[in-house]
Image: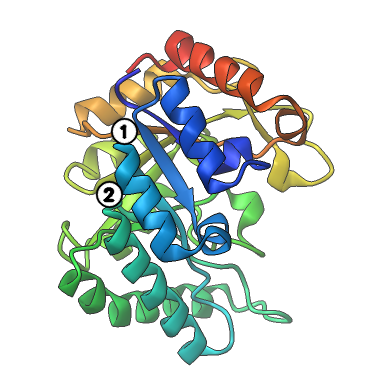
Amino acid sequence: MNRLSLNQKTVNGLGLAHAVEVCARFGIGAIGVWREPLHEFGVERGVELVRGSGLRVSSLCRGGFFTRPDRAEVIADNRAAIDETAALGAECLVLVVGGLPRGSRDLAGARERVRSVLAELAPYAADRGVLLALEPMHPIYCADRGVLSTLGQALDLAEEHEPSVVGVVVDTFHVWWDPDLAAQVARARGRIASFQVCDWITPLPADALLARGVMGDGHVDFRAVADLVVAAGYGGDVEVEIFNAELWASDADEAVALVRDRYDRHVGL
């Protein structure tokens, strides 16, 4: 279990302190922190708690939403997220880049806005030693969450910057379907900032945001994707990030025990 990281969204009902305690009790060495519970706990207190726990912070989730209309607000919020990432000593700041602005059908323009905002933020991140991690999202989220739909699109933007400043997230939920996945993961050597795992389940729930399943409950070949990521040189933590109403409603200890067992059986890194 040395590389297993528990993303906080997997235990969505737990506050930061409880999530840290659960990781320690189950022998999980890393945690993916979300900004909202960090803010609720208090950023300074949260940094002290996490650092004092001995846990690695595999990521801070999330920055991004670059396509929102108020650019100054977008820049300010993402700079704050970069500062929080640095304070936590997190491996990266995950960026969900945003969908189409309300009422817009200009997909090319939205993607250009992502490129422009990223270019403005990259020097700030570099000065603070923070790695920005672009997360491509499954195409069903293109309109409202992420106009980067493939790993190749994310790499096109990342490659405009140094690998120490901008990388990419390989999330099995978002990329498992991509016929070009093997080539793009190989291309991502030196730029894989985060490897996240959960399953793609069918039928999709009414809220597609909650369509993630526990590993082994759906259609993803985790060993195949993990082999690609390892072959591309990634040796970091593997985050289990699951948005699932049934899992969230279950007992937290039972949920974590299930996640740990399925990680061992299906991912095994």
Left or right of residue 55, residue 241 in this image: right
Instruction: Tell me residue 163's x, y (percent).
Output: 17, 57
Left or right of residue 159, residue 114 in this image: right
Which residue appears at 16% of the width and 45% of the height? 190
Left or right of residue 50, residue 197 in this image: right
Q: Residue furthest top?
A: 265
**Quick check: can you spot residue 218?**
no
Q: Is the residue 45 above or below the residue 104 in the image?
A: above
**Quick check: can you spot residue 29?**
yes
Residue highlighted by disc 1:
237
Q: Is the residue 158 above or below the residue 150 in the image?
A: below
Asked if labels 1 and 2 touch by Cβ distance under 8 angstroms, the answer is yes
Residue highlighted by disc 2:
91
Q: Nearer the viewer, residue 112 or 41?
A: 41
Q: Quadrant of the C terminus?
A: top left
**Quick one: SS at disc 2?**
loop
Q: Give the residue type that dot 2 points to.
A: Glu
Q: Which of marks 2 and 1 is nearer the N terminus?
A: 2
The quarter of the displayed image where residue 155 is located:
bottom left
Which residue appears at 62% of the width and 73% of the height? 100
Instruction: Tell me residue 168's x, y (percent).
Output: 33, 51
Which residue appears at 70% of the width and 37% of the height? 211
**Quick one: SS at disc 1?**
loop
What separation in Å lies between label 2 and label 1 (alpha carbons)? 9 Å
Left or right of residue 243, residue 96 in this image: left
Q: Is the residue 97 above or below the residue 189 in the image?
A: below
